Amino acid sequence: MTQAAVVGFAQSPCRVRQDATTSGVEMLVPIFAEVFRATGLAKADIGFWCSGSSDYLAGRAFSFVQAVDAIGAVPPAMESHVEMDGAWALYEAWVKILTGEAEIALAYGFGKSSGAPLRRVLALQLDPYLVAPLWPDSVSIAALQARLGLEAGRWTEKDMAEVAARSRSAALANPQAQVSGDIAAEELLGRPYVAEPLRAHDCAPVGDGAAVVIMASERRAAQLCARPAWITGFAHRIDSGSLGARDLLAVPSAAAAARAAGADKGRAVEVAELHAPFTHQEIMLRGPLGLGDGVAVNPSGGALCGNPMFAAGLARIGTAAQAIMSGRAGRALGHATSGPALQQNLVCVMEGR
Amino acid sequence: MGHPSPAPLRAPLDIEFDYTRSLGPVLSRFMTALADRRILGARGADGRVHAPPFEYDPVSSEPAGELTEVGPEGTVLSWSWMPEPLAGQPLTEPFAWALIRLDGADTAMLHAVDAGSAAAMRTGLRVRPRWAASRVGSIRDIACFEPSGATPPAAHEPDTLQGAPAAHEPDTQDRASAGMTVTPVRLHYEHTASPGESAYLRGLAEGRLVGQRCGVCGQVYIPPRGTCPADGVPMAEDVELPDTGTVTTFCVVNVGYPGQRVTPPYVAAAVLLDGADIAFQHLILGCDTSEVRMGMRVRAVWKPPEERGTTGAISHFAPTGEPDAPYESYAGQL
């Protein structure tokens, strides 16, 4: 079986955009052009396209079909879609390459998170019988999880603020970030709660954006990229959808995905890009993903500094791949999450050769 | 875009739909019991009682075992504070979300607690359900929970479930069951039109038809799409088109439907404007439906200037009386 490597990545700036429609086209066209320039590829070279987006975010049915305008699908392209973050679209692309159905695949994710109140829209991903009818919002559910950890002594509000301060400081070097700055944790702790025990800095900002990753087979990767990010493991797992029946302080699906992706095997991971939309979730994920103190976590600032829905997870993998393609890391881990309170987790482990 | 554009047009879009879902056997009994002000849990393969119950055990995948009554009181395991409740949530005044383990259960239920203030909330707080006055077999039959020591608001029905709950007694009564649950969904969006769509809509309000041409393939799209769907590149230029065109194909609408603005029978047609490479749909009025044919030449009938706007300016298309366009001139559109 062939292997696959990430050979290109681009993402749009994460912003609340007044000029972008929910079709994603305005955000996708420039980053497709950017990733084609970097790899020397053209649309005709792409054997498989796969997108991740959401009709609930767009407010209409089959919204992903309009995004195909950004591809320019004449002659017809082999194209697929997941109603998930683009990281899961990348997983489908990876399978297409491993099974020999495509040599070069492009995955993209996009979301205009600001089109409707995001906290309400995300209530529709919950159990439709017992939970969604109450409209519990995404921030409140994360807050229930954060309090469990606070009261169990797993972390403090100061630990959470320090994650935010470190992320914002790191994001100063990331022009795509929506939030960045040098601010001390102590100052953040003086600010009001938005959903006690969460303050604004504990929650990812609401922003619009898109991301694209190009992946190639063993035969093609080295022609397209001086230092491809070879995928050594890629897996995703899910925990129960019942919030009250699972241990919200354990993330068995993240641990299982990391194990299945071989994160604990071979060379040590040097850089990890985690899709943690809330500060306490970054703290929660380190253990299950096997990330020790020596790992650089979210050197981009992570999702806390820019979380375009349905693109942010793919952007984490692309950013981790970039660390390898640029020579800054030998082995990197990209993570994506979906669902409430880290219900679903995906891990992609990559290395340079 | 080849010229600076004013800000794109924006408009609100309110979407409303009711999800009507059929219930499995366990949730059906659970919802039926709620309407009767009782809360049921399901015993899993490991002996744990799940409340709310499951149809299939999340660990063993086995069907639910016996259903037992739990609560109605319970204990708060975790909570968060909602200072500004969002539309649709159980309470309109500030409240707490909480994971509540009902007495006799081993898992937690997510619901709202009407505690009055965050200072009154704590993990370990004892709470009891406040039942909705009207109960239909829904999780919303529990209006919210409230601290057990609180005086029940006078406006609510007295709680007839007195004293200790009949925990772990099998629910053996045969009842009419709630087979369906209806969840209304109301979402408010603020939609943005693309720059090309905005130019088109603003043009309509001025009585002009503005399309866009692709710089690669040369095709002219109206309404504009911003990006050429064939080439995936931004459109090169705006193109103003005449308000005359050709019917490429059509159908006669004979069926009425809610919200219909024209009385059937009438014709909905694909109209290819002169100079455009894609047809758009519009009404053909001003002649008998039997006269409409493929190739018929038509012209836009504009609303009076004072009625034109960015949401509509053309009333319909009507025959021009010119000779029909030759088939070859629109065959590529079919």
Image (spheres, rainbow, N blue to C red):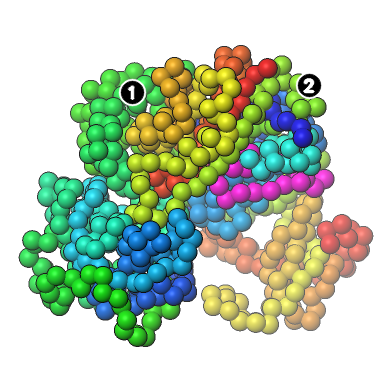
Asked whether A220 or A253 is in front, the reply is A253
Screen quadrant of the N terminus of chain A: top right
Q: With respect to residue B168, does B50 lie above or below?
A: above
Q: Chain of mark 2?
A: A
| Chain containing the residue with disc 1 | A
Residue A122 seen in this snapshot: yes
- Up-down relation of residue A55 to residue B134 (above or below): above
Q: Give the tally of numbered discs.
A: 2
- The residue depicted at 66 percent of the width and 51 percent of the height is A65
Instruction: Tell me the residue that label 2 is attached to.
Output: A223
Please tell me which residue is depicted at 56% across the width and 23% down the height of the picture: A332
- Between B174 and A202, the residue placed more toward the observer is B174
Label 2 or label 1, whichever comes before in sequence order: 1
Give left or right: position of B25 versus B276: left
Mark 2: few/some/many CA within 10 Å (<14, 14-19, 20+): some
Left or right: where does residue B326 sit relative to residue A45? right
Task: Measure how far apart labels 2 and 1 are at the Cα level.
Answer: 40 Å
- The residue carrying mark 1 is A165
**Viewer-proximal residue, B133 or B227?**
B133
Please tell me whether residue A85 belongs to the stretch shown in magenta.
Answer: yes
- In the image, residue A257 lies at what x, y percent? 53, 38
- Residue B291, given in percent of the width and then of the height, sits at 80, 79
Amino acid type indicated by mark 2 = Gln
Q: Amino acid at mark 1?
A: Ala
User: What's drawn in magenta, residue-wise?
Assistant: A71-90
Q: Nearer the viewer, residue A136 or B305?
A: A136
Give SS at disc 2.
Answer: helix
Q: Is residue A68 left or right of residue A139?
A: right
